[in-house]
Amino acid sequence: MTATVESTSGTRGKVPEVSKDAVLVALKILRYNPEVDDAPHWETYDIPALPTDRVLNLLHYVKWYIDGTLTFRRSCAHGICGSDAMQINGINRLACKVLVKDLLARKGKTTTITLAPIKGLEARKDLLVDMEPFFEAFRAVKPYLITYGNEPTRERIQSVADRERFDDTTKCILCACCTTSCPVYWTDGSYFGPAAIVNAHRFIFDSRDEGAGDRLDILNDTEGVWRCRTTFNCTDACPRGIQVTKAIQEVKRALLFRR
């Protein structure tokens, strides 16, 4: 279950001792509380951090020791659940996977790390966005095995080669990094987006599935795969290394040659 880290209390906890190996980081966060703010604004927190700390650790430091009202999502903290997707220095990343040492400035200079919510989805509070439009597109492509006729009397056998055909797109963790890195999605949220297409791809090319035609019809819509402009933003943003642009092109090719 995804946990939303939120508190109405601004009470500070007892600050832990600072390690001699710590560096000073200026954590610049785009804050927004719809109950009191007319628009988002930047707030900066000076935080001691170890080079091996993750950006998520810095958010916890602010939450636990400076301002308990800071709001963001996180769950497993191991790059599997996809909950803590955000813009880190302007690039979509998972806060639990990015290390401070990879963002450090030149020696002798204070490192500034900027954090903002992912684009294209409504910011509800601070780094927390409304994920429902994203999941609505995901559900629309029927991301599950579809078969017709009688139930088989034994498991559906699949060759190693058939499994490898869609192996890459099974890695999606629905973090929305790819979809919210897409300029088309920013400007028109009705576009299905890369993540939905990736999850359709996973079943379109599954040899056991019989619903590929339905999904291809869905993605042949004006808001489907043809909206993709092949900017490769989605592939660059994917924390799981999925070749998102390649998957989209394969779905386009399947549409062109399915007759």
Image (cartoon, helix red, strand yellow):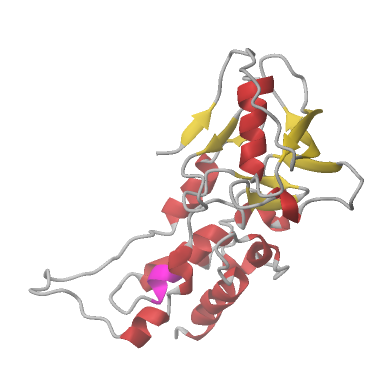
Residue closer to the observer: 15 or 152: 15
Q: Position of residue 84 (x, y in %)?
A: 57, 43
* Identity of the residue drawn at 58% across and 47% down: 96
Residue closer to the observer: 69 or 259: 69
Residue 17 versus residue 203 in the image, above or below: above
Residue closer to the observer: 211 or 241: 241
* Identity of the residue drawn at 47% across and 69% down: 169
Q: Position of residue 48 (x, y in %)?
A: 75, 34
Q: Residue furthest front?
A: 20
Q: Would residue 63 appear left or right of 27 to someone viewing this image?
A: left
Q: Position of residue 131 (x, y in %)?
A: 54, 41
* Identity of the residue drawn at 45% across and 83% down: 258
The quarter of the image holding the N terminus is top left
Residue 169 versus residue 73 in the image, above or below: below
Name the quadrant containing residue 154.
Answer: bottom left
Q: Would residue 27 appear left or right of 200 to someone viewing this image?
A: right
Q: Position of residue 250 (x, y in %)?
A: 54, 78
Q: What is the tally of numbered marks visible in this picture? A: 0
Does any portion of residue 81 appear in the rendered image? Answer: yes
Residue closer to the observer: 74 or 177: 74
Residue 155 versus residue 23 in the image, above or below: below
Query: Per the image, is 203 magenta?
Result: yes
Q: Residue furthest right?
A: 108
Q: Would residue 201 appear left or right of 147 to someone viewing this image?
A: right
Query: Per the image, is 54 magenta?
Result: no
* Identity of the residue drawn at 50% across and 59% down: 196
Q: Would residue 165 appear left or right of 222 to someone viewing this image?
A: left
* Magenta-colored span: 201-205
Does any portion of residue 124 appear in the rendered image? Answer: no
The chief SS type of the magenta part is helix
The quarter of the image holding the C terminus is bottom left
